[in-house]
Amino acid sequence: MKYDMNSLKAEEFINDEEIRETVRYAAEHKNDTALIDEILEKAALRKGLSHREASVLLACEDEERLERIYDLAEQIKKDFYGNRIVLFAPLYLSNYCVNSCLYCPYHIKNKHIARKKLTMEEVKREVEALQDMGHKRLAIESGEDPVNNPIEYILDCIDAIYSVKHKNGAIRRVNVNIAATTVENYRRLKDAGIGTYILFQETYNKKNYEILHPAGPKHDYDYHTEAMDRAMEGGIDDVGIGVLFGLDNYAYEFAGLLMHAEHLEAVHGVGPHTISVPRVKPADDIDPDAFDNSLSDEMFCKIAACIRIAVPYTGMIISTRENAKVREKIIRLGVSQISGGSRTSVGGYAEKERPHDTEQFEVSDERTLDEVVNWLMRTGYIPSFCTACYREGRTGDRFMSLCKSGQIQNCCHPNALMTLKEYLTDYASEDTKRIGEAMIEKEIGTIPKEEIRQIVRDRLEKIAAGERDFYF
Ligand code: SF4
Ligand code: SF4
C-alpha cells in the first residue's frame, strides 16, 4: 500500500508505513532546532502544517522551542476564536449496541449494564431538562444496533428534539454521533437538519483497531475509516473527527488524525469542522489501566497545542471526561468548544440525581452548566450558545472560506454576546448574571464597527424584553 492522500481507500490515505516513517522522522529530529525554527516560522503564517511538520513539533524537547509552540498555539487560538467558548451537551439516546469495543461499557458482552432506549416522550423530557439548563446545541449519541436503534429511530429522535419549544428554550443545532453508515443514511441525516456528523476513529492503527473491535460491524476498519467520505458524498459537509487517546501510541494517533484532515481537504475541498480529543476513562467494566498507552496531562496539552497550530481553522472539542484543571489549560491552548453540565447516561437529564447505571464514562467535571458558565467568565472567556452558521447555510467550504478570511469573527463575537444575554435572562443564577452583564458591557466595546455595535445594543434590549434568537 502506498500513501496517497487523494485516494478513497482507507489504507492509502491513512497509510501505516507513512505514519511509522513520520513518527521515526519526528523522533530523529526532536532536537533539530534549525528544522523546528523553520517549521515554527511556517506555522506563524497561520496556514497550517503537514502531519510530518506537526509531528516534529509534537516530538520537540527543546525547552525554549516548546515555549514558542505553546505561545503560538495560544496566539492562534486568540486570533481565530477570540475569547469565546461554545457550549454544548451530549444526549444519550440508546445504549443498545451490537459492537464489542473493548474500551466502552456498552459493548455487547457487558451483560450486567442496564440497557435503555429513550421513547419519543422520554427524548422530549430530556430536551426540556436540557433547555431548562440553557442548552441550545446538542450532540446525540447512540450505540449501533440495527434492530433497537435503526436510522429511522435516530431520525425520529432528531425531529422530536427540534420540535420541543419549552418556555424560551429551543435546541437549535443537533450534532450527531452515531456509527458509520451508508451514503443514503447520511443523506437522510442531512435532510433531517443535522449540524455536524461526528465519528471518532478511536485508533488509526489498523492492527490495534481490529483487536479493540473484535466483532460486530465496527470491526471493519476500512468501512469505519472511510465513513467521512460517504458522509460528504451524502451531502454532510461539516464532519467531526477524533481519536480516543490512550488506545494506541499518541504520536501514531496524532499523525493519523492530521492525515485524515489532509485527506478530507484534498478530496472534498474542506477539512474537518471539528477535532475532538477524548481520553480513555473509567466506566462500568472498563479499567483505563488495561490500555498501556495512557498519556500524561502535560502530553495531552502538548497534543492540543500542536493540533491548534497544524489546523488553525478546525474547531477543537473537549468533553467533561477531563477535570476542570485540565480543561482550563487546554482551552487556553486551542479548544473552542466544550460540553457543560453533561450526563453520560441514557435518560440522565430528566433525573434529579446524576444516575450512574447506564453511564458511558465517568464524568470528571461534574459542575452544573451555570457553574461552568460562571467559571468561564471568571477565567476571561465568553460562554457562547451560538448556532448561527449552519442555520445561515454557512457550512463546509462556505464556512471555511469565511474562517480563512478572518471574517467569521464578526459573526462569532456579537452572536456570543447575544446568546449569553439569552442565557443570563432565562437561566443564570444571580452571581452569574451579575458577572455576565458586566462582561457583555465590556465586550460590546470591542466590536470594531459602530453600526454593528448599535445593532447589538438594540438586540440586547429586545432580548431583555422577551424576544429571542437573533444572529448574524
Ligand atoms: S463505542 Fe460505540 S460502538 Fe463501541 S460499544 Fe460503545 S456504543 Fe457501541
Ligand atoms: S458564528 Fe458560526 S463559527 Fe461563530 S460561534 Fe456561531 S456557529 Fe460557531
Image (cartoon, grey):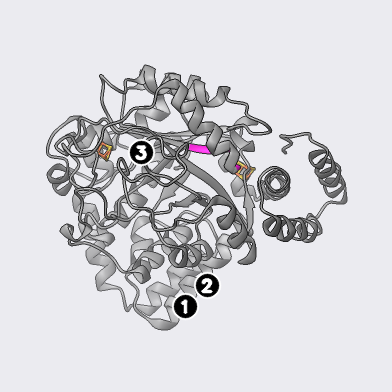
Q: Which residue is mark 1?
A: 67
First in sequence, mark 3 or 1: give its number: 1
Label 1 SS: helix
Q: Which residue is outermost to the front?
A: 352
Q: Does residue 137 show up magenta in the picture?
A: yes
Is mark 2 in CB contact (under 8 Å) with mark 3? no
The image shows residue 388 at horizontal and vertical percentages of 64, 37
What quarter of the picture does the N terminus occupy?
A: top left
**Amino acid at the residue labelled 1:** Glu
Marks 2 and 1, how far apart at CA: 6 Å
Numbered disc in front, either 2 or 3: 3
**Amino acid at the residue labelled 3:** Leu
Label 3 SS: loop
Is mark 2 in CB contact (under 8 Å) with mark 1? yes
| Viewer-side residue, 451 vs 384 | 384
Q: Is residue 21 above or below residue 299?
A: above
Residue 161, numbered label: none
Main secondary structure of the magenta stretch = loop
Res. 269 visible in picture:
no
Q: Is residue 274 left or right of residue 444?
A: left
Disc 3 Cβ-to-ligand 1 distance below 8 Å = no
Marks 2 and 3, how far apart at CA: 30 Å
Residue 71, numbered label: 2
Q: Which residues are magenta?
A: 134-138
The image shows residue 92 at horizontal and vertical percentages of 39, 36
The image shows residue 147 at horizontal and vertical percentages of 25, 19
Q: Is residue 396 above or below residue 255?
A: above
Q: Residue at x 57, y 49 (%)?
A: 86
Q: Residue at x 43, y 68 (%)?
A: 39
Q: Which residue is mark 3?
A: 199
Q: Residue at x 24, y 44 (%)?
A: 104
